[in-house]
Image: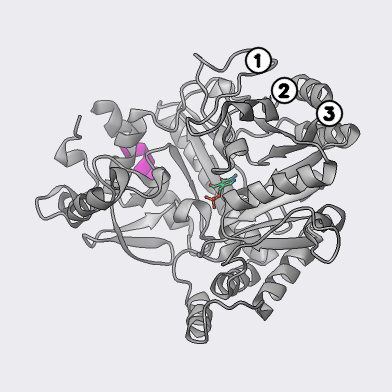
Amino acid sequence: MSPKAECLPSAAYAGAASRSRTLYERACKVMPGGNTRHSIALHPYPVYAASGAGCRVTDVEGEERVDFLNNFTSLILGHAHPEVTRAVQQRVASGTAFTMPTETDVALAELLCERVPYVEQIRFCNSGSEAVMLAIKAARAFTGKHKIAKFEGAYHGIYDYAEVSEGPTAGNWGDPADPERILEPGSPPSQADDVVLLRWNHFDQCRAQIERHRDHLAAVIADPVCAGIGMIAPRPGFLEMLREATARAGVLLISDEVLSFRVAYDGALTAFGIAPDLVSLGKIIGGGFPTGAVAGSRRVMSVFDHTGECRVHHGGTFNANPVTTTAGLETMRRMTREAYDGLNALGDRIRERLARMLADSGIGGQVCGRGSLFLAHLNTEPLVDYRSLRGYSRTQPAYLDLCHEMLRRGIMTSPRGLFGCLSTPMTEAEIDAFVGAARESLLAVRGH
Ligand SMILES: Cc1ncc(COP(=O)(O)O)c(C=O)c1O
């Protein structure tokens, strides 16, 4: 059903001369579904971007909005930071890609190795999915084992093994002790044998699965913020238990920080006092350009060392391309401890204010997230694991209406839920604008 014109993101978007609609019609002729990235699909057609500056984006109709998505968390300084832009322009003018390494790859690698206690060595690639794939391959090569364990409902990008059971339903998720492995339609059935499913926050289930599969299990992969599982906080001691159980079983722990690296200056697990064996990175370390990285202890990273045994081949035409590493270096240099502290304090503010608004307005709900990340759940049942999310689904129709309402009120958010992230140009005024728009939008959606 098509939404009513007055509920759409703006009159210009809905109107006969809509540029977004015209662009979408052109896109439909040359791309399946008119789309080249499922996660940004919007019904009835996308809002096409024209430009961005700081924490604001302007669409092709000329409407400006505050951007709480930041290209799905990858822009921590917001759009077109003047000094990052200047450095990139200089880089572009003096060549964008070489069949040679550059000084900026070394400098960005040094910065990350200095900051994160569990990053001794690093290699760059071009996306978070690739980083996850390389971490899994490295774990297999290092341990000589082939299975990987992941959390039911967790998102780690589009590598086949990491995609298993990303969105199972009550109809197919099976035994809580040993969940069904739900494959993507394009995956071979044999893949299910090589993946073990864990359940977030279930200490005994995780210990039992790790022990049961220890002889074949290369690694457990976990996103410390668990963005795919509604950002439900780990129970006290849960991540520490994972570290201990994996170490005891001779299984590597991969911390997937593609998204969660933005929560802390020195890595998402440092605050927990634990160190994974490998970490996958992406998003913010590219300063707005495509990137990824696999990193970890020198011992495990040695599987990539071509001067030694070289157990994992790692090519990639654009690995550490100098435009990305220049933008990444300029961005990460600006993300000092103080910059993280300021951003994370704003994160506390938006989580508190959203929770208060949901309670005071009678809408009800609860807010998860850490650092500069937040996600509001519109239910009040205890949230423990993927199965407990029940009412929350990345594709619930109610979120589409909510997204349209938020866009109409000048806030960029997603039809996949009421979540977002902050960027350093934001102030309390933008936080208050988000909370005000969320309140009005939620009440409006109820009236639809
Ligand atoms: C935790 C996590 N891992 C991996 C990925 C994949 O990263 P990319 O989209 O750069 O392939 C994402 C993307 O959102 C992610 O959130």
**SS majority, magenta:** helix
Q: Considering only vertical position in the picture, is 370 above or below 53?
A: above
Q: Earlier in the sequence, mark 3 or mark 1?
A: 1
Q: Residues within 10 Å of mark 3 (few under 14, many from 20)?
A: some
Q: Which residue is mark 1?
A: 176
Residue 331 percent coordinates (x, y): 58, 69
Query: Which residue appears at 52% of the width and 65% of the height?
Result: 77
Query: 242 above or below 73?
Result: above
Spot the residue most to the left. Answer: 16
Choose top left, top right, bottom left or bottom right for residue 32: top left
Residue under the point 57% across and 21% down? 387
Q: Are marks 3 and 1 in contact (CB under 8 Å)?
A: no
Q: Percent position (x, y) of residue 65?
A: 33, 56
Q: Residues within 10 Å of mark 2 (few under 14, many from 20)?
A: some
Q: Which residue is mark 3?
A: 214
Task: Say which residue label 2 marks.
Answer: 202
The residue stretch that appears in magenta? 436-441
Question: Which quadrant is the C terminus positioned in?
Answer: top left
Q: Give the alpha-carbon distance from disc 3 to disc 2, as whole Å.
A: 18 Å
192 relative to 109 in the view: left or right: left
